[in-house]
Image: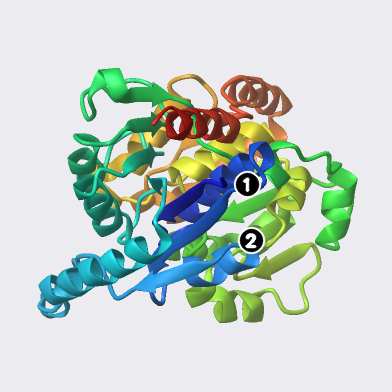
Amino acid sequence: MSKRIIIAGGGTGGHIFPAVAIANAIKKIEPATEFLFIGAKGKMEMEKVPQAGYRIEGLDIAGYNRSSLLKNLGLPFKLIKSFFQVRKIIGGFKPDAVIGVGGYSSFPVLRYAQSKGILTFIHESNSFAGKSNIMLGKKATRIFTGTPGMGKFFPADRTQVTGNPVRATIAASEVTQEEGLNFFSLKPGQKTLLVVGGSLGARSLNEAVNADLDELIAAGLQVIWQTGKPYAATAIERVKNKTGVWASDFITKMEYAYAAADIIVARAGAMTVAEVCVAGKPVVFVPYPYAAEDHQTVNARQLVNQKAAIMIPDSEVKEQLLPVVTALAIDEEKQKEMSDHIRSLAVHNADEVIALEILQRISNK
């Protein structure tokens, strides 16, 4: 009889892509496995999960809004409504296990599953666990973590360090730099800068690139610039009629972007960190300062301490981006040192390790 698994969570690519990677890895081992994803209505998982070939149900749920307290008045009602929706979805699908990857929809789904004695698994990608995952971890069957030292957040006997699942298209990529450059209509033999502000973009980073663009080009750099949707129109207008620059709201084939790049500038979300390690390119991190518990700074600092990355605080990105990037671009020795160090931190098979453990636990139940 085929296994049935629910995967809950989303909100950003950092939650969605590992969720899909885990599903794909399970499917590779046991092709008959049936999946249902649960996300939050209006969030990017409602688009990205079906594109990956999986069915998804959306909940009427939202997170706490720090910028507008009035918008939080309806949160208790949304949470109650989401629990009724979850009860109906789980009752209809009858899963053997539920996997939570973080994001608004994770909490009510796993909480309900735990109340019904269903096996629950958590994947915590960050080096600082979120409050929801800490609460859910008390009753979870198994907690998979992206980094070591998470015993302060979760029961040690049920916590397993696996690393973070990287999309197979990136982890197993054989795209050459020439093919990557060709994909973005850029020239070979010229240093290429990849700027990635996460799947939703990064305003301060975008504004710094916008301000420094002419100087970056004058320094001999080509630029691949993923802006996120809010800044896309501004960036596309800014690069109009310029050669050696590619800008868009989203890069669908990141393996080509990583292959094309000589230097990467990025936020320090856990999945970006995992992908950059696999890509093995010198990276300048600009952590998002408002992430919960400032976990992006923690993520970035771990690599900086191992001489695998450079970090610029978000508050200094407008002043520091140009001098840091241009200095790195001409320092071949520093680039090689950073590449060697970051490549040694790469984990290529986290999805397979997680998949095997989940399937084993379901079989043993």
Residue 197 lies, with reference to residue 161, above or below; the image says below
How packed mark 2 is, by other alpha carbons closer than 10 Å (few <14, some 14-19, many 20 or more), is few
Residue 237 lies, with reference to residue 142, above or below; the image says below
Question: Residue at left 60%, top 70%?
Answer: 249
Q: How is the image coloured?
A: rainbow
Where in the figure is residue 232, as x and y percent of width and height? 57, 76
Nearer to me, 57 or 269: 57
Identify the secondary structure beneath mark 2: loop
Tell me the residue that label 2 is attached to. 52
Mark before the other along the chain sequence, 2 or 1: 1
| Marks 2 and 1, how far apart at CA | 9 Å
Find residue 24 and name its label.
1
Nearer to me, 100 or 202: 100
Question: Residue at left 78%, top 78%?
Answer: 241
Q: Is residue 80 rendered to the left or right of residue 123? A: left
- Identified by mark 2, the residue type is Ala
Identify the secondary structure beneath mark 1: helix
- Identified by mark 1, the residue type is Asn
Quarter residue 349 falls in:
top right
Quarter residue 209 falls in:
bottom right
The answer to whether residue 67 is seen in the rendering is no
Where in the figure is residue 360, as x and y percent of width and height? 49, 28
Question: Which part of the image, by quadrant, shows the C terminus?
Answer: top left
Where in the figure is residue 8, as x and y percent of width and height? 39, 55
The answer to whether residue 326 is seen in the rendering is yes
- Are the residues flagged by discs 2 and 1 in contact, CB closer than 8 Å? yes
Question: Which part of the image, by quadrant, shows the N terminus?
Answer: top right
All told, the count of numbered labels is 2
